[in-house]
Amino acid sequence: MTTSLWRHARLTTLAGTGWCDIDHGAMVVQGERLAWVGPDADLPRDLQVDAEHDLGGALVTPGLVDCHTHLVYGGHRAREFELRLQGATYEEIARAGGGIRSTVAATRAADEATLLAGATQRARALMAEGVTTLEVKSGYGLSLEHEARCLRVARALGTALPLTVRTTCLAAHALPPEFDGRADAYIDAVCQWLPALQQQGLVDAVDAFCERIAFSPAQTQRVFDAARALGLPVKLHAEQLSDQGGAALAARSGALSCDHLEWLSDDGVRAMAAAGTVAVLLPGAFYFLRETRLPPVQALRDAGVPIALASDHNPGSSPGLSLLLMLNMGCTFFRLTPEEALRGVTVHGARALGLRDRGTLAPGQRADFVVWNVAQANELAYGFGHNPCHRVVVAGEECL
Ligand code: DI6
Ligand code: FE
């Protein structure tokens, strides 16, 4: 196992309350983990290292976690964007058979290599800004065969690239055309697919879209029951366009996270707080759909619900590939503090994926960290449209 020393850094560790900065900081990395983190002056005297890196005072944060993406799909929806600019709404387009369904058709028509090439390009764009852990949802296949294919592509990303990929089965995303008028039969099918997908090692968690234009709370509950019976954690697209009571339902099923949440009720906040469910806010979709209703950030804070931020990258409602932009949008739109925004894409993003071994700079954590070309961490949320990411280390190995 190799040992390396990273010194002369400004460490924003996030390992307690506040930024938890160490101004003249050092980190000792042993293999894939951080072995020691503290002031340069306190470094253990008898330290033997294989490599030493002088960071010249640069800022270091934990590696970024994008805990909600739909990275695997075929085609794009630029035409739908034009229709929305002419006045059509996202819901109207979905009800007319466009929206998610049009991406399902393009995804089914693409071969696996094409899907992998597209997803790889997108993952690389996120990684260039310091993303070291990425969640990828299925949900544009909507048959056992095509959902499996999308999840295999997601797994392949994690093998081919230096980052951790967590896969989420979102088969309950939209009703495929072959099940028109038979939503309950489709949910039955999804519940039957889960064991097969799990046996192929393709599923880390199960998600659903609980919404007027998607699935009802009762249908969502059936998907969750099937997931829980297999020991799979659940999460939910909840309260994005209307209040369906989805977040409370998900929290009562022990959900890792509820995502979107613009229409979240007080009851939903309470249920999430009681269950320790993370609130994943998605300002990219809020922006791109020109939503006006804000998620109840102060109520979430008051209740002690951990808040994460993610890109929600997808071709319909959030086609951007910048997690740093989400920090800025999380602050400007949702009034998060820059520190909350950074926590949202590190420690709280990790928690939304059920991962406790990353998201802070502390001994025992995975050595996933980013060296930035800025002096202070609040600048990461302040600027936008430029990339201050300088060096990225994943599991102790420098990879950018
Ligand atoms: N909410 C979203 O933001 C994405 N899926 C979902 O349930 C959007 C999916 C799309 O429009 O393609
Ligand atoms: Fe989403």
Image: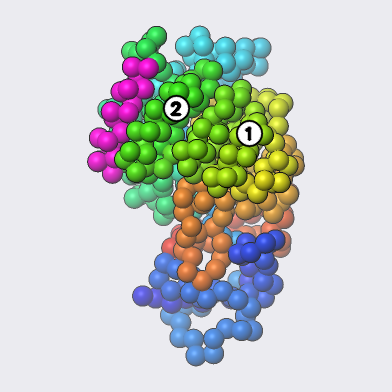
Please identify the quarter of the rendering in which residue 103 is found. Answer: top left
State the image quarter where residue 7 is shown: bottom right
**Which portion, as a residue range, is magenta?**
184-201
Residue 327: % across, % down: 66, 45
Q: Nearer the viewer, mark 2 or mark 1?
A: 1
User: In the rendered view, does 29 fall on the left or right side of 112?
Assistant: right
Alpha-carbon neighbours of circle 2 within 10 Å: few (<14), some, or many (≥20)? many
Q: Left or right: 360 with respect to 338?
A: left
Taking the spot 32% from the left edge, 22% from the top edge, the residue there is 188
Residue 336 vs residue 238, the one in the foreground: 238
- Residue at image position (60%, 71%) is 55
Query: How are the residues colored?
Result: rainbow
- Based on the picture, tell me whether residue 194 belongs to the magenta stretch: yes
In this rendering, the answer to whether 39 lies above or below 199 is below
Q: Position of residue 173 (x, y in %)?
A: 44, 25
Residue drawn where x is 49% and y is 65% of the image: 365
Above or below, 261 against 3 in this view is: above
Q: Position of residue 208 (x, y in %)?
A: 45, 30
The Cα atoms of the two marked residues, 2 and 1, are separated by 18 Å
Give amino acid for label 1: Asp
Closest to the observer: 138 or 306? Answer: 306
Q: Which residue is mark 2?
A: 220
Q: What is the secondary structure assignment of the residue under circle 2?
A: helix
Q: Secondary structure at mark 1?
A: helix
Mark 1 is surrounded, within 10 Å at the Cα level, by few (under 14), some (14 to 19) or many (20 or more) other residues, namely: few
In the image, 221 versus 132, the foreground residue is: 221
What amino acid does circle 2 point to? Thr
Q: Which residue is mark 1?
A: 267
Q: Is residue 271 above or below residue 51?
A: above
